[in-house]
Image (cartoon, rainbow, N blue to C red):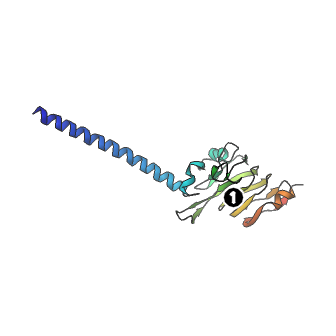
Amino acid sequence: MIKTNKKRALFLGACASLIIFAAGCGNNEDTAEKESSASSAVESTEVVTTASISNDPADVLAGLSEDGTWIYAITDDVTVTDDIVVAGTFHDKGEESGDVYRKLALYAQDEDHKVTDEFTLTAPTMTVESPNFKIQNGTFVGDVVVEAEGFELADSTIEGNLTFATQELMDSAVLDAGTVTGETTVAE
């Protein structure tokens, strides 16, 4: 009788452990699935650890600051009440050996990298101090002031004015795949 109760207790303990383990794994799978889904908004899973993805206005400001990351993405329309300053020098995919590059992703994409949705980021002004900064897809509503070389609009729109600090900076920009609804000028 005692031997049967011990077996039963061991069996019940093993079952409880299995249930707890399975529940823990399920939560991790849900979290991993959400992270994977969010990361597909901008890049492959190879670069998930170096991308920042958030729709919180404070996170947007921090993510594009000098202390931010090489790529920042939103997954819905976002309005920031403060001016945005894109600062710092970053490298493609966060690798020091990569080219100097920074990206703002205003879109979602599927696992085949096909754009599935585009978003709008609104702020009074965005000042670009990071070299080789690209706005990819979507729309920025506000004025943009470029103070670094290599600015690029890639299938994106600026609903506002685009002003370059110098003619050289304007000459280094790639704008032909984007749209600016306001004036594109060089500061006087």
Q: Please determine whether, in this image, residue 1 is positioned above or below residue 90.
A: above
Left or right of 155, for residue 42: left
Return the x and y of residue 53 as percentages of the image width and height.
58, 50
Return the x and y of residue 78 as percentages of the image width and height.
63, 53
Outermost residue on the front side: it is 97
Outermost residue on the left side: it is 1
Q: In the picture, which quadrant includes the N terminus?
A: top left
Q: Residue at x 72, y 62 (%)?
A: 153
Work out whether residue 181 can be spotted.
no
- Of 169 and 45, the residue lying toward us: 45
Q: Residue at x 65, y 61 (%)?
A: 138
- Of 182 and 113, the residue lying toward us: 113
Task: Report the residue marked by disc 1.
Answer: 135
Residue 114 placement: quadrant: bottom right
Q: Residue at x 67, y 55 (%)?
A: 103
Residue 155 placement: quadrant: bottom right
